Image (cartoon, rainbow, N blue to C red):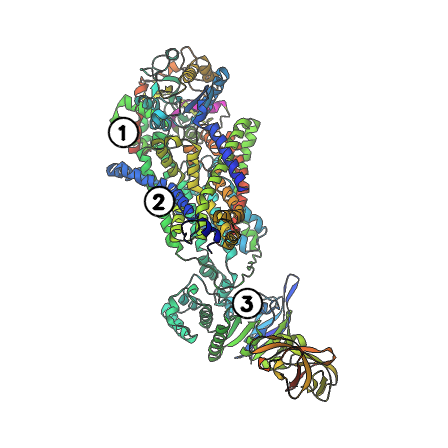
Amino acid sequence: MTSTTETMFSTAPRRRSPAGSSWTLTIAVVVALLALLPLGFVLWATAATGWDTAIQLIFRGRVGELLTNTVLLILFTVPICTALALALAWLTERTDLPGARFWSWMAVAPLAVPAFVHSYAWVGMWPAINGLGAGVAISVVAYFPFLYLPISAAFRLLDPALEDQAASLGLAPFAVFRRVVLPQLRLALCGGALLIGLHLLAEYGLFAMIRFDTFTTAIIDQFQSTYNGVAAYMLALVLVLCCFVLLGIEAGLRGRRRYARLGPGVARHVKIAKLGAWKYLLLLLPIATAAFSLGIPALTIARWLIAGGWSIWNVSEVGLALWQTLVICLIGGLATTAAAVPIAWLSIRRPTRASRFLEGCYYLASSMPGVVVALALVTVTVRAILPLYQTVATIVLAYVVMFLPRALVSLRASIAQVPVELEHTAASLGRSPGNALWSTTVRLAAPGAAAGVALSSLGIMNELTATQMLAPNGTRTLAMAFWALTSEIDYAGAAPYAVLMVVFSMPLTWLLHHQSKKIAGR
Amino acid sequence: MKTSSLLAGVALAISFIAASSPASAQVKDSITIYNAQHEGLTKEWAQAFTEETGIAVTIRNGSDLEIGNQIVQEGANSPADVFLTENSPAMALVDGKGLFAPVDQATLDQVPDGFKAGNGHWVGVAARSTVFAYDKRKLNEGTLPKSMLDLAKPEWKGRWTASPSGADFQAIVGALLQLKGEEATAAWLKAMKENSTSIRGNSTAMKAVNAGQFEGALIYHYYWAGDQAKTGENSNNVLLHYFKNQDPGAFVSISGGGVLASSKHKEQAQAFLKWVTGKGGQKVLRDGTSFEYAVGKGEASNKALIPLADLQAPKVEPSTLNNAKVTDMMTAAGLL
Amino acid sequence: MTLLQLTSLRKNYGSVAALDGVTLSVPAGSRTAIVGPSGCGKTTLLRLVAGFDQPDNGTITFDGQVLADGSSHVPAHKRGIGIVAQDGCLFPHLTVLQNIGFGMTEDRAAKEASAAELMSMVGLDRAMLARKPDQLSGGQQQRVALARALARKPRLMLLDEPFSALDTGLRAATRKAVTDVLSAAGITTLLVTHDQGEALAFADQVAVMRAGKFAQVGSPRDVYSRPVDPATAAFLGEAIVLPAEIADGRAQSPLGLLQVDDLGYRGRADILLRPEQISVVAEGEGTAGTISEINFCGPTSDARIALGEGFSFRLDIPSREMLLPGDAVKIGVSGKAHVFR
């Protein structure tokens, strides 16, 4: 395999490992260290605070209240989301529900509406709603697609022969669902539920608007009172611990095994359950879901747009916010994807324990709430690396930390589809390893990279917490402008920003849906 | 293809950084304002100021203490030239660290005593009064609290709301601390945790009263007038109760402005403060939609407001309001 | 006694007729193989019997009970019919023990006892009970699948190409093991396969299927040596079909005068010879022919042999004759030729 050019031009004998591989690893390690910075910061801050103060700030009534709120929120929201997503996925994937394809889109579309816009819409509809009940209800409509996506994809992948087999072993349809289908959906269920749990921990705008206090809202309160005080650090520590608890629960429930299809059998087209007369009753579920998750935002926004008339469309301000948002989304998306390239390539081409460990680091880092990431970067830059303070570079780093897995998933899938033999062939035709990589794998993985840029951009566009805390002077993204206006209950003035966020998120959401179908087998 | 898109991204990034970072503040006639005042008000000021003087203004928005603490952290490297607040404590915080340059005498002369820091390091730019915004369907002259301190009594349990996470409220607590001492303030905060419901934002608190969720809210006066001037949708069931009688609840909070000692555009920054406290800036307060009180000598406030002189506010020294103590006490009371 | 009776079954998928009127009797205790090329409808037939799909028309009767008749339908889980699928279809999330115990209603201890017994019945080590399916080889998976289906003590077992995914050597051994187990248990079996050798070796009754219909149903010997038409003949094995003039149990053909299995027929017809009936030697008795092409393949050589009048046929001949293209040979025929009437 060692090419003649290599022996001719290199003075020292080289090992099999191609040049570039070690560089790639180095870059991947550096990115991982940067990604773990917030986590390290929280640990450092705790240590620096000292035990007495830390204990005093952690073991107090307020933290207990927040913990109760957070636990109740998760305990209600996640199971309801699971039941709803499961029912919708079954109806759209496995039954002859009229318009199943349409309802499938309707079940993903709420992702185009940022969580805090959902909240804005509900408050516009029912001004008095507040507290746990409202938090759960809005969280469900805002986040259930995170479960719907993987569950419906998993439904498509299930081998229907297994269900036939279970029936032939004497199981009635519901028992088949419980004993055969559900266990195979476990990965999708666990993954989606974890994602929702992490979003619940990290979300600010949704809960702030309906005055339901969580750790994140409390940290922001502290931030607004003291910038980066010790009390905020300690709340962040507890929040990070909550994330770890969720990650641990998920790891325990998921088990270590992936359920691949056994044997080379060909997947038969799935059996579609005939709903008969039930279909009209069951149709109410997707209709009601769409009414709450899409109808309410649409109605409220439309109402405020009409009430506000032309005067709320201050073209220079709205236009500037849109332009700045698009630019920052593009920069953030490109940076995130670029940062994901080394680890994506390593995990496919050189899967070692080290690369798996690195990958785990990225996922762990991205599960840290935006408020923690931002708090860490604000403190580190203002105290230690002042030239980076309040710069685009810092906010982009925050986005990289938060959204890298989105780009990684897309890249991995597309790199995996490029046979390594193409690289070898290019090398045998005289290209250097780097050049061979560039002219084959990189070119062919470009669609995946584009999807990675798009998906991380979607996250950036709807990100509020970290953006508010880290934005460079004079920056005003759509989300920031929207939030500033709703904070002064100028709901009409905020409507144009909500519309723009939704409109620009839609194609990206479509892409997400499309991609989940494609890479469901991962 | 990838190379070109990357290059395009880098080019965009550079143009973006150039457009928005402190680097642009080095253009000669340009200042950066760290703004904790209402965005709308500061924007109005800035636009009118730029029109008159040609000095461009970049605004970073935040809340009083967030930005105050931020400036302290940034120290000598702060990109800010001017700091504007809604309340005095954040001004006191920054001044306490010696980060303000003295305000030009001409500017100080435009504002009466009591509305500026005694040492001349910052100046009042506007003022707001504490009020009890109440649901007129539920309360009347006879049943309203006589003093803000009454809200700590058990009979007020569950009936009122406030926004303790905001700097506005924390300024009120700061005044209470200065007027009644630490012990009384701690007791009052403890009772408040029991009695009141916390809402984020004064306007949201008023909206909740309007919607009948609470009988009253301890907020500032201008939210009501502002809403009435628009649609009244969030305030038509609400009236304002001024405590008067030098009660802690009659506290008038002074919004401050100062020039940072680290500023590289002091001249322009001083010009801005002079303009804001002068005819132009105070006219914006009188004729605009902010409904905050004008503080300039001889400058009348908006006609819709009870004159500042009639509020019987307690005498509070704005430059010594201690917000660090307040947040500690509120954290201890479980309000933060 | 007939255990399973299929009568005029029809099933369409859209406009395509997967089953176009299928009738079959499966005697109790017998082994029936349904053989046909892929896409002929044999898997559809099996799915109808299992209850995974419903026929559009026709009836399925099992042990006197109507399972499906085009309108009503007994669901799969109430039929008590076992099935072993092509790839075993083990539940990937369960252990071998849980797979075998999946359809059993007994308590845990009884499940474990029967599972252990079934494991030895299908020739697997009990130690494997704790494994997950992906830790088993293909042949082992198939045996577990059989054990799992046997656990329910079905009266009819459906085998859906259960050996096709296995390597050649393993295939024969697994097939033998499965046949033995099913015979010992006296379970009626319906095998679906595209492998004619497998069908002939396994069954008492073979049904040859083509385009949604049975071309022929009969004993393995019968369908092999007396196929109904040249296509069936070719599907079941190498076939040499020659035109002939038949009278009085003899046929005049390019291979000379041959005995035929049809004493009554007179006139022109095609006749069938199987390669094992034909011997080719350089020197000796028989019809004269010429090697027109020959490819050495080890023990045998693949030869094309030209007869007079432009006829030729292909045949594997022993390589020891060392024949070359153009060599003259003598062709001998033993046994009777089959007449396609």
Which label sits on residue A242?
2
Where's residue B248, x and y in %? Answer: 32, 22
- Residue B269 located left or right of residue C236: left
Along the line of sight, which residue is nearer the eye, A392 or B49? Answer: A392
Residue C74 magenta: no
Measured in 3D between alpha carbons, the distance from the residue under mark 2 to the one under mark 3, in whole angstroms, is: 49 Å
Above/below status of C46 relative to A259: below
With respect to residue A271, does C242 lie above or below? below
| Position of residue A307 in the picture relative to residue A342 (left or right) | right
Q: What chain does mark 2 sit on?
A: A
* Three-letter code, disc 2: Cys
Q: Tell me which residue sits at (74%, 85%) in the image.
A: C266
Q: Residues within 10 Å of mark 3 (few under 14, many from 20)?
A: many
The segment highlighted magenta reads B217-229
**Viewer-nearest of discs 1 and 2:** 2
Q: Main secondary structure of the magenta part?
A: helix
Numbered tag placed on residue B186 in the rendering: 1
Q: Which residue is mark 3?
A: C51
Describe the element under mark 1 as helix, strand or loop.
helix
Give amino acid for label 3.
Gly
Report if residue A230 is visible in the image. Answer: yes
Q: Amino acid at mark 1?
A: Ala
